[in-house]
Image (cartoon, rainbow, N blue to C red):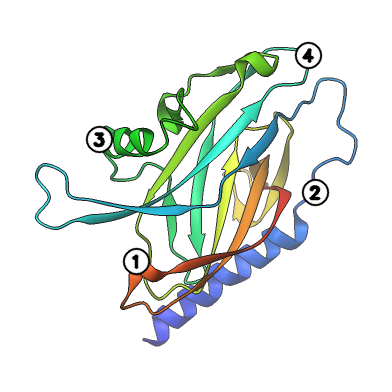
Amino acid sequence: MKGFVSEISAILMVMACVSLGAPEPAIVQGPDEWTVDATFEHPQQIILQLGGDKQPRRYWYMIITLTNKTNRDVDFYPKSELMTDTFEIVPAGKGTSAAVFEQIKRRHQGMYPFLESLEKAGNKILQGEDNTKDIAIIWPDFDAQAKGIKIFIAGLSNEAIAIDHPTAKDETGKPVKIYLRKTLELSYKLRGDAAFRSGAKLIYEGKDWIMR
């Protein structure tokens, strides 16, 4: 138990060092930097029992709408993670079949007839409102004991920077480089009894752009 506590303390120390040393996104971007416009719906649940499942499974998803007003077509290599306040990190799409997305698409067909999944959204966002993308980001259910979550969405900007790792060294003794991308961070509190997961409510606390 003592060893486990020591490992957790070490992880938290590294996270704190990286957080304190991390730069913030530029207030005014450079001439070759871009960020697409992003609006979003707050996460919600869907419970499905698909072929092969012995029990219904719970998933969380959100829909983000991206419009490229940068006057250029841009590369799009998205990545999203959900992190709980219990230190669980859940990558988007983990353990979710295409059938989950199809159910979500049917649910929102009226509002988002051209909805795409994050994994199949392509590697370009063309300029102009006619090329706006509506994208579903999906996670399996997370730790029922969590009281808060953060959602990170990268790939909406090409702004990036390299910083030194606070502890890790390469073979020459120099700090290992950490590459950070401008990332949208969404914060939520989670209310409700863990025993009644379907009644859980997410309370939106705000958004920020960070380097992560």
Q: Amino acid at mark 2?
A: Glu
Q: Comparing marks 3 and 2, which lies closer to the viewer?
A: 3
Q: Comparing marks 4 and 3, which lies closer to the viewer?
A: 3
Residue that lies at the very extreme toward the front in this rendered image: 110
Residue 195 vs residue 164, the one in the foreground: 195
Report which residue position mark 2 lands on.
24
If you read the primary sequence from the N terminus, does the residue marked by circle 2 or circle 4 appear first? 2
Is 102 located above or below residue 45 in the figure?
above
Tag 4 near tag 3, CB within 8 Å:
no
Q: Amino acid at mark 1?
A: Ser
What is the crowding at mark 2: few (fewer than 14 residues within 10 Å), some, or many (at least 20)? Answer: few
Q: Would residue 72 be found to the left or right of residue 52 on screen? A: right
Which secondary structure lies at badge 2? Answer: loop
Tag 1 near tag 3, CB within 8 Å:
no
What is the crowding at mark 3: few (fewer than 14 residues within 10 Å), some, or many (at least 20)? Answer: few
What is the crowding at mark 4: few (fewer than 14 residues within 10 Å), some, or many (at least 20)? Answer: few
Report which residue position mark 3 lands on.
99
Report which residue position mark 4 lands on.
71
Q: Amino acid at mark 4?
A: Asn
Q: Is residue 77 visible?
A: no
Q: Is residue 68 visible?
A: yes
Q: CA distance from mark 3 to mark 2?
A: 38 Å
Give the image location of residue 67, x and y in percent.
67, 25
Is 162 located above or below residue 44 in the figure?
above
If you read the primary sequence from the N terminus, does the residue marked by circle 4 or circle 1 appear first? 4
Q: Would residue 188 be found to the left or right of residue 205 on screen? A: left
If you read the primary sequence from the N terminus, does the residue marked by circle 3 or circle 2 appear first? 2
Q: CA distance from mark 1 to mark 3?
A: 21 Å
Q: Residue at x 69, y 64 (%)?
A: 17
